[in-house]
Amino acid sequence: MVRCIPVSSGVVTACFRGRPLNVSVVQVCAPVADGGDEELEAFCGQVGNDLQGIPRRGVCVVVGDWGAGVRSGGAGWWRVEGRFGV
């Protein structure tokens, strides 16, 4: 690991030296869907700013919880979500 940058309580970036390319991993934990629009806009802006700071040469992987939730009564979505919303 070259560096680890905790951007906020919901975003952390880790950079790894690799061959032939370096790897940057951005771990996110998005606010829940019930949160306000301002909170979501601030989060998306923060992730966007963080992605701009990553070197263009290399691999960037963005992973995490994007605020997905399990819905009840998901008729028609069972092939996409699975039985438990996965």
Image (spheres, grey):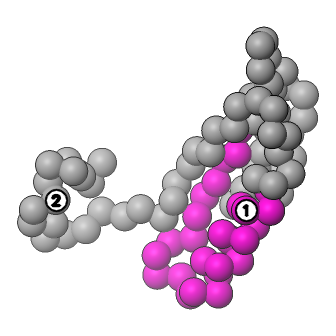
- Report whether 39 appears left or right of 80: right
Q: Which residue is mark 2?
A: 77
Q: As drawn, which residue projects farthest toward the right?
A: 2
Q: Quarter holding the N terminus?
A: top right
- Report whether 74 appears left or right of 8: left
**Residue 85 spot, x, y in % from top left:** 26, 54
Q: Secondary structure at mark 2?
A: loop
Displayed quadrant of residue 15: top right
In this picture, which residue range is highlighted in magenta? Answer: 25-50
- Report whether 83 appears left or right of 7: left
Q: Amino acid at mark 1?
A: Gly
At a point 86% along the width and 51% down the height, the residue shown is 53
- In reply to whether residue 82 is colored magenta, the answer given is no
Q: Earlier in the sequence, mark 2 or mark 1?
A: 1
- Using a 10 Å C-alpha cutoff, classify the residue at mark 1 as few (fewer than 14 neighbours), some (14 to 19) or many (20 or more): few
Q: Amino acid at mark 2?
A: Trp
| Mark 2 touches mark 1? (CB < 8 Å) | no
At a point 81% along the width and 32% down the height, the residue shown is 57
**Residue 62 spot, x, y in % from top left:** 62, 45
Q: Secondary structure at mark 1?
A: helix
- Using a 10 Å C-alpha cutoff, classify the residue at mark 2 as few (fewer than 14 neighbours), some (14 to 19) or many (20 or more): few
At a point 10% along the width and 62% down the height, the residue shown is 76
48, above or below 53, in the image: below
- In reply to whether residue 35 is colored magenta, the answer given is yes
Displayed quadrant of residue 26: top right
Displayed quadrant of residue 29: bottom right
Mark drawn on residue 48: 1
| Whole-number angstrom distance, CA of label 2 to CA of label 1 | 30 Å
35, above or below 65, in the image: below
